Image (cartoon, rainbow, N blue to C red):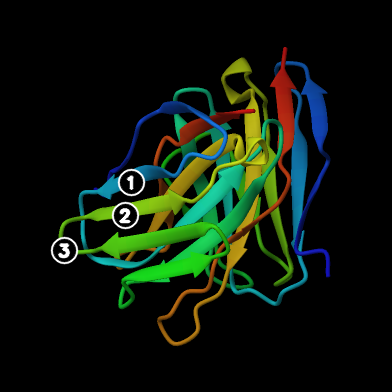
């Protein structure tokens, strides 16, 4: 059974810092990995999708990498801003079955 | 383009009552999912569908039923609500394009309280 872990569970940083969020998964047989953002009381917004054949994806200040063989992904946020404060979730799409398996999320707070 | 729309957004039920949550997507996606999100438990899959007329069980299907009569709609039913079903429910959809799955899109959620 696929298990997805996100460390740390919570992170507080001053504005302007570059930061890295971690996601690890136990079964490397995945189709893709997706990073989401969730604001309090809201739904999930897709940030980046990395297919299993890709190593990284970039969107603005966000860069996500994937090392499928070691079961790891990182989300890099450059020059963090208070508006980046949210919970960040990673999810993997397994080769077997049709479901997304989610990590527990990292709750990020960026202080002005 | 609305994406994924969930109805209702909030609901309070009494124990034993029934209700149906509606999910509608306008992206012509084949795959649709129902998740529940609980503090400390993350997102857990309840049921999913890989196409019109199909449904399958996820991790936590007990107490729920689903139907996918039309491709764009996926309904989640609670026949006899229990306090343990108090949660936030999310619907999602995605597409399989030759074994390359597209990104998953989520609705805004339904906050259900069972008293």
Q: In the rendered image, which quarter contains the N terminus of chain B?
A: bottom right
Which residue is most to the front? A16
The disc placed on residue A73 is 2
Residue B94 in the figure: left or right of residue A18:
right
Q: Position of residue B73 (x, y in %)?
A: 74, 63
Task: Say whether mark 1 and mark 3 are on the same chain.
Answer: yes
Decide which of A98, A44 is in the foreground and name it.
Answer: A44
Please report contact status of discs 3 and 2: CB closer than 8 Å, yes or no.
Answer: no
**Label 1: how many residues lie within 10 Å, few (<14), some (14-19) or many (20+)?**
many
Decide which of B113, B39 is in the foreground and name it.
Answer: B39
Q: Residue placed at 61% from the left, 63% from the top? A: B93
Task: Say whether mark 2 and mark 1 are on the same chain.
Answer: yes
Residue B35 visible at all: yes
Q: Residue placed at 39% from the left, 41% from the top? A: A103
Quarter residue A99 falls in: bottom left
The disc placed on residue A23 is 1
**Disc 3/disc 1 C-alpha distance (Å):** 13 Å
Q: Residue placed at 48% from the left, 54% from the top? A: A35
Q: Residue placed at 48% from the left, 44% from the top? A: A89
The residue indicated by pointer 3 is A69
Q: Where is residue A105 in the image (x, y as percent from the top left)?
A: 45, 36
In the rendered view, tell whether residue B108 sits above or below residue A64: above
């Amino acid at each position: 059974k696929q298990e997805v872990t996100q460390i740390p569970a919570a992170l507080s940083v001053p504005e302007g810092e570059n930061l890295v969020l971690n996601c690890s998964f136990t079964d490397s047989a995945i189709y893709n990995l997706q990073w989401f953002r969730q604001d309090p009381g809201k739904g999930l917004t897709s940030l980046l999708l990395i297919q299993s054949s890709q190593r990284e994806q970039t969107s603005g200040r966000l860069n996500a990498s994937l090392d499928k063989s070691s079961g790891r992904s990182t989300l890099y946020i450059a020059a963090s801003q208070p508006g980046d404060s949210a919970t960040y979730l990673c999810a993997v799409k397994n080769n077997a079955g049709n479901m997304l398996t989610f990590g527990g999320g990292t709750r990020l707070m960026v202080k002005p | 383009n609305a994406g994924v729309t969930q109805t209702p957004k909030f609901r309070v039920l009494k124990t034993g009552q029934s209700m149906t949550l509606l999910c509608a997507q306008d992206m012509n996606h084949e795959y649709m999912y129902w998740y529940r999100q609980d503090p400390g438990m993350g997102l857990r899959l309840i049921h999913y569908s890989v196409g019109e007329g199909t449904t399958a069980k996820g991790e936590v299907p007990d107490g729920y039923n689903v139907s996918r009569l039309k491709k764009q709609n996926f309904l989640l039913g609670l026949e006899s609500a229990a306090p343990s079903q108090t949660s936030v429910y999310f619907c999602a959809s995605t597409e399989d394009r030759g074994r390359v799955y597209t990104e998953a899109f989520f609705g805004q959620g339904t906050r259900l309280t069972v008293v």
